[in-house]
Image: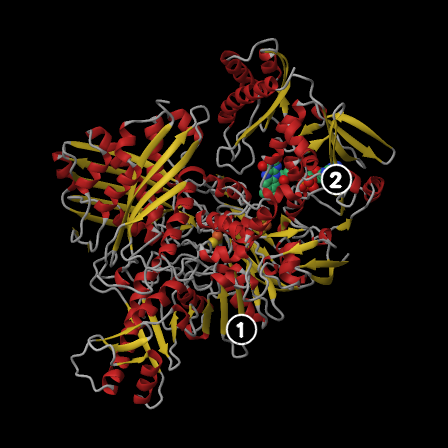
Amino acid sequence: MSLTKFDYYAPERVEDACRLLMEKGEGAMVMAGGTDLLIKIQRGLLKTQTLIDLQKIESIHDITFDKDKGLSIGAMARLNDVANHPVIKEKFPAVSEAALATANVQIRNMGTVVGNLCNAAPSADNAPVLMAMGAVVNLVRSNGERQIPLEAFFQGPGLTVIQKGEIVTSVFVPTPPAGSGASYQHISARGKVDISAVCVGVMLTMKGKTCQTARIVLGAVAPVPMRALRAEKVIEGNPISKEVLEKAGIEASKECKPISDLRAAAEYRKILVGVLTARAVNEAAKRASKKPN
Amino acid sequence: MQEFVTIGTNVTRTHVRDKAIGAAIYTDDIRLPGMLHGRLLRSPYAHARILHIDTTKAKALPGVKGVITSEDIPRIKFGNWRLFPDTQDEYVLAVDKVRFIGDEVAAVVAIDRDTAEEALSLIKVEYEELPASFDIDTSIREGAPVIHEAFPNNISIHRKVSHGDVEKAFAESDYVREDVFHVHAISGAYLEPCASVAQCDYSGKITLWTSTQVPYIVQCLLATTLGMRENDVRVIKPHVGGGFGAKMELRKWDFCAAFMAKKLGKPVKFTLSREEEFETGRRRHPMRIYSKIGFTKDGMLTAKDLQIYLDGGAYNAMGPTATFLCGNYGLMLYRYKSYRFHGQHVYTNKPPASAIRGFGSPQSTFCTETQMNMAAEELGIDPLDLRLRNAVHEGDVIPELSKIGSCGFAECLEKVAEASQFRKKRKNPKKGRGIGIGCYSFISGGVFNWFNTQYPFSAAEVRVFADGTAHLLTMASDIGQGSDTVLPQILAEELGLKMEDIRVTSADTAMTPQADLGSWGSRVTLMAGNAVIDAAKKIKEKLFGAVTAHFNLNVIHDLECKNGKVYSKGRPDKGLTFGEAVALAQKFQRGEPLVERGSYTPRGKGLVTPAFSFGAQVAEVEVDKDTGLVEVKKMYTAHDCGTVLHPQSVEGQLEGSIQMSLGYALSEQFVLEGGKTLSTTFLDYKMPSAMDMPESESICVDTYEVEGPLGAKEAGEGLVSPTAPAIADAVYDATGYRCYDLPITPDKVLKGKTKL
Amino acid sequence: MKQLVTLNVNGNTYSLAIDPWRTLNEVLREDLNLTGTKLGCGDGDCGACTVLVNGRSVSSCLTLAVAVQGKEITTVEGLAQSGEKLHPIQEAFIEHGAIQCGFCTAGMEMSALNLLKQNPSPTEEEIRTAIAGNLCRCTGYYKIVEAIGDAAKKMKV
Ligand SMILES: Cc1cc2nc3c(=O)[nH]c(=O)nc-3n(C[C@H](O)[C@H](O)[C@H](O)COP(=O)(O)OP(=O)(O)OC[C@H]3O[C@@H](n4cnc5c(N)ncnc54)[C@H](O)[C@@H]3O)c2cc1C
Ligand code: FES
Ligand code: FES
């Protein structure tokens, strides 16, 4: 690894990690799987003096589920652990699908869902569904902790609300209300294993054939994952018909603000947003109606 | 036709065991005592004058052992086209000017890679930026920036070929169409980044291990650039992790490793990073192809006018050959009553293009085959029938250029149509589905000596031993395609031995017989194979003499080597084991071992190749009407590669070529901005993964090529050409979108579709 | 800056003093001379550097050597029982012609092992997904997929 030289710590308690972060100052960074971080260090994009590896902190590896409250994904839970977790597959299939859609096997064995969120790439595969499902991020610092809705977590490409000395210990997903369903849809223009050109996460609650509430989150089409509020309005209070799907797609594609990059042109991304929004809403509705009301 | 014993069977490939257990040594795996590590400083500008280079700080960094710029080394231009020194346009390190982002400016050698890397950042280069050109149109415009002073119009090569009166033929044609196609650059994307390790002995002689397809060419050009004699340089090719044409030149790190090893008296290694490979590596030529073709109303081709501009990037590299070959590919496959070709190789301020699998063929075949498909539709003739009417056949003469030997093209068309049910599926389209076709013909090595070698094109040395074994030495380079398997296999067949009886030593310029031009242009099997047979024949002559004498056989007896024996065909009881025969023959020479040299140089084989391969491919695709995404469901291939020497390897070549061509057709491309490559990782340069691959079904059409070893000819390189036009045709069939500019991206499909 | 690290590779224990920024790939190749594990990109994209850590496949180019202390590391050199007895995955790769240039092979075999440990009877689709992080430019993956399918059968008997 060229140029950047750093010290390495692997504390065993969250407090120690937070303390180290404060002590070591500006150049201190935490590492989960390292699949984003180490690449950035190698390319000289980050000036790291101290690397704080979280893997030895046992308490943050866990995935726990409490059916009254919800699902808690620890900061060191690897993408594959989330993708293959029997409870997540059964009760939060879209969360599992999003984790499975991230990268390839090796990277999923290393990388974490929380790392994916903290890295704050606009295209992060795990963000849209979790945001649509109203996930909350748990942040801990030496002298306290706070909970921030994922929706308020991102501040720009690579930027989050995480403050100096803070680490994320878990992300919490509330148990979805009865009659709800979620879906994750993503597409690359260039092959099946790729960073998503567009990704969409949706959660709906249905009453009979009618949609009560809708949350649609678009990824890779704005500096941060964004709610498609106008598209949500199109759906709420309506049955999920072909026309409604189409209209929601059109609204979502009008709302998003994609850029052109080497993965896809902005114009094409807008088209994909329309298509994927309709597909995700449709699947979420189907899943909602499969569950007993 | 011959009956074979070893040929045509899937003998275990020579090095696969070593590769399976991780024991095969590739260049970067080599570690020598005291070895130093080098890195290259590259230009950040696409076109700039170098005003001043200050290396003091870099040299002062602890751990740095040497820093060189063009001031410190012989200023000798090099290039593969030695026959035409005007085409040799590269210096090892930039002299006065840089011509693309990534052009090598200086080299650092240090105790480790990190130190060398750090030293690079301490070299201060003052540049004066010059206007640059990034495309063909800009380069050929009046007043364009001049990239090489010797070529003020930026065109470094012209190639013209013609026969017949094209204008008259067009005037008399019932149907004429002209089109312009744009094709893009792709990377060879071999998995092993380039690397070299050099060592210099006490007497100043160099040994270089390098990841190359052409050890002999590297030896010669390295000697020239170092100002040394050829024999003072030894080049060894370790295992190579793929080349695909992009490793067929002397590369700058080869020189820098050797020069620094000599200067410092320590072994030196250079290994490129993947980023460097993508930013600066050799790539397939982008081209602008104008083609006009004429037909009679019953679909007989009358004329073709083909004008191609090749975007060569900053240096010629293998561009001259590509320019030359495009003219040939333009008139292979079909009978053109008249033909005119003008190819022009244009300099631009981009990384040099060179020879990537197919060497001009994927580009010109994309044009040929797409036009055939368009013409078929407009003439109202089935695309298969149109091809069958115009297909070349055995014995056809390509005016002024060549004569077609064995040719299974028509049969390939029939077979692939049958396997894919092309006609039926074309007539009964399913929504979202499409089927399309593309064909190819390719060379089995070129006949033209641009390298100006003074040796035969290929050579082999065979040594046989009284213990019943043989040793094959050849400079042919196995870069994964399997020549270290197929050449001994040919020898085994000739000498009646088993594979395990044969040891093979290859691609070491000090140990293996002079010479071999390398692994490219699908030349190895045919040329080195013929050299092996030549050597084997001489060995056999000696063995037959010994057996004849031993049994006092009548001179009219016909002898053969088979199943480990040497005997009279008519009287199989009159024979010896192979080892006994060798022992006896050796006695006749009073102990001198039996060693024979064989060689092959194409002579009197026209101006193209000794043998042509053929094939036809059908693609079935599914297109998502909403997203425009194309999924290739199945590829059907029928190809004629003469005798199939090793079926698994031939299939492997075909299957690998489907991956590469699928990428060419759909997903692979370099994204550049102002001459800077943005796609510098495999995440951004997208080649197909195992999940993207279609099903594949293939048929080998049985032919026997008399020019080839045991009837064999080219397999695997030509196959990269039909895939993109077949997929493009299938996409057209499904959507009405006709692709004129590769790759076929989903946004183009959505914009261009007229149905679905 | 160097840290004393104990690495357990293929059942052998190595004590080394290493800089914390060095990757497992570098340490395997440069310090332990286990050059069977390749470096094709260094970006986690190509899979040529795949090794198993505690039984799971990871990219050794994106793993810090100091971070895998005390864990069980398996590289391609640890697959075969002996020079004569190869691992069924290796045998299948050889038999099926799944190896051309061989640069992707070690990584492919390790990904195959990762798959077959978790899923002894994978479908073709599952095999393709399992090696989606391993690029190969030579084979088009066909024979590799076949070989892994066959290795699964071989490993059951
Ligand atoms: C080949 C490859 C393919 C990829 N493909 C995809 C893809 O398809 N989709 C996708 O979304 N991503 C992809 N990625 C990106 C990456 O793998 C994911 O974002 C992954 O989830 C990151 O997790 P990690 O644990 O490795 O994060 P790390 O690299 O360890 O950390 C990422 C960032 O988050 C910070 N961080 C991590 N954990 C915490 C914490 N608990 N508290 C505070 N800060 C923290 C780190 O300091 C760092 O800045 C790919 C990466 C590679 C190398
Ligand atoms: S070298 Fe690690 S993934 Fe390519
Ligand atoms: S065999 Fe060459 S890359 Fe896979």
In the image, the residue with mark 2 has its CB under 8 Å from the nearest atom of ligand 1:
no
| Chain for numbered disc 2 | A
The answer to whether any part of residue B677 appears in the image is no
Image coordinates for residue B14, horizontal then vertical, percent: 44, 64
Circle nearer the viewer, 2 or 1? 2
- Left or right, C58 with reference to B303: right
In front here: C92 or C4?
C92
- Left or right, A193 with reference to B595: right
Q: Residue at x 39, y 63 (%)?
A: B485
Image coordinates for residue B163, horizontal then vertical, percent: 16, 48
| Chain for numbered disc 1 | B
- Residue B552 lies, with reference to residue B659, above or below; the image says below
Residue farthest toward the top in the current orientation of the protein = A237
Q: Residue at x 79, y 27 (%)?
A: A147
- Residue B4 lies, with reference to residue A206, above or below; the image says below
Image coordinates for residue B34, horizontal then vertical, percent: 63, 70
Q: How many marks?
A: 2
In the image, the residue with mark 1 has its CB under 8 Å from the nearest atom of ligand 2:
no
In front here: B586 or B576?
B576
Q: Which mark is residue B200?
A: 1
Q: Amino acid at mark 1?
A: Cys
Q: Amino acid at mark 2?
A: His
- Left or right, C94 with reference to B600: right
In front here: B448 or C24?
C24
- Residue A20 lies, with reference to residue A138, above or below; the image says below
Disc 2 designates what residue? A61
The answer to whether any part of residue A280 appears in the image is yes
Q: Pointer 2: residues within 10 angstroms few (<14), some, or many (20+)?
A: many
- Left or right, C78 with reference to B3: right
Image coordinates for residue B274, horizontal then vertical, percent: 54, 50
Image quarter hosting the C terminus of chain A: top right
